[in-house]
Image: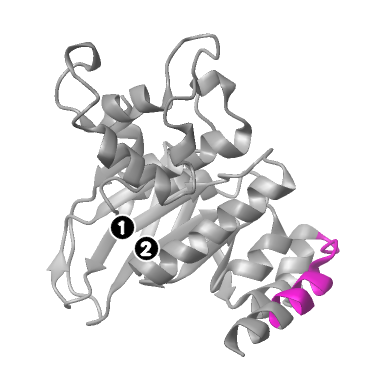
Amino acid sequence: MFKNIMHHHAASSEDCTKLCCTRIEDFAVKIGRLTIFDHVNIHIHCGQLTAIIGPNGAGKSTLLKAILGEVPHEGKLHYVDAKGKHTGHPVIGYVPQYLRFDVSAPTSVMDIFMACISKRPVWLCSDKSLRPRVEKSLARVHAEHLIDRRLGALSGGELQRVLLALALDPMPDLLLLDEPVSGVDQNGLELFYEILTELREKEDMAIILISHDLNMVARHADQVVLMNKSVVMSGTPQEVFRDSRTRRIFGMLAGGDAALMDAQAEKTGRED
């Protein structure tokens, strides 16, 4: 079950510009006469974080499921790797908004990793051979100390970091994050975004993030896509948040301008 949740190999690919990139072309999901979304076109370079924002019911989560191939859809997914090779089989990592499980169960972080990466039933496996691999995966998200912790004893932020570590083994070409820090405290939220920054820099990974936290989007996203059953507009955080269409959808963006100013100052500081 967890294998299917965390990783997918997408099908179908054609020509794309000769850059390391993912291109979502003319995606649409329709159920009978109901259109969930249509004409969605997004182009993402490796090393870029693209945030998708929009009101409830805009089709954001369904778009991620369409990319994963979990819902019938129209359109094509193109992927070109760093060598300019066209491939129809990018590895896609996925972190859901939350994971349903019995919090009273004795399942540990190590157990869930073994369920994902072992080809044999967990009860027939020894964790000794897999433990170094799991520790390495958890270290990417600063969570190696959680390896023997029971899932039900993890905080919201800790659990989301564990799910992120699962999505990074094997290392994906495209990482999809569906409201991954919803309900996580401020410290956990800051740490999660710091880890995403490290991943983009070290792994040159393309990331698509759905988020309602406009302040964090303003600080960390390279590209913002405003979606409301189709792509309303896309651009830098500054371009999207200052556009009248964004303000019409969200109303007055609480703290939005301040966030943009903070984001600009932070980016300037990093460049310096």
Which of these two is toward me, 137 or 4? Answer: 137
Mark 2 = which residue?
26
Mark 1 = which residue?
75
Q: Residue at x 68, y 61 (%)?
A: 216
Q: Is any part of residue 43 visible from this angle?
A: no
Q: Amino acid at mark 2?
A: Asp
Q: Residue at x 30, y 50 (%)?
A: 92
Q: Residue at x 67, y 84 (%)?
A: 269
Q: Position of residue 242 (x, y in %)?
A: 74, 77
Magenta range is: 251-264
Q: Are marks 1 and 2 in contact (CB under 8 Å)?
A: yes
Question: As drawn, is 28 to the left or to the right of 75?
Answer: right
Q: Position of residue 143 (x, y in %)?
A: 48, 42
- The answer to whether 259 is drawn above or below residue 10 in the figure is below
Which color scheme did the rendering employ for the protein?
one colour
Could you tell me which secondary element the residue under label 1 belongs to? Answer: strand
Q: Position of residue 81 (x, y in %)?
A: 21, 70
Mark 1 and mark 2 lie on one chain; the one further toward the N terminus is 2
- Crowd tier of the residue under label 1, counting other residues whose Cα lies within 10 Å: few below 14, some 14–19, many 20 or above: some
Q: Is any part of residue 14 visible from this angle?
A: yes
- The answer to whether 254 is drawn above or below residue 91 in the figure is below
Q: Amino acid at mark 1?
A: Gly
Which of these two is toward me, 232 or 155? Answer: 155
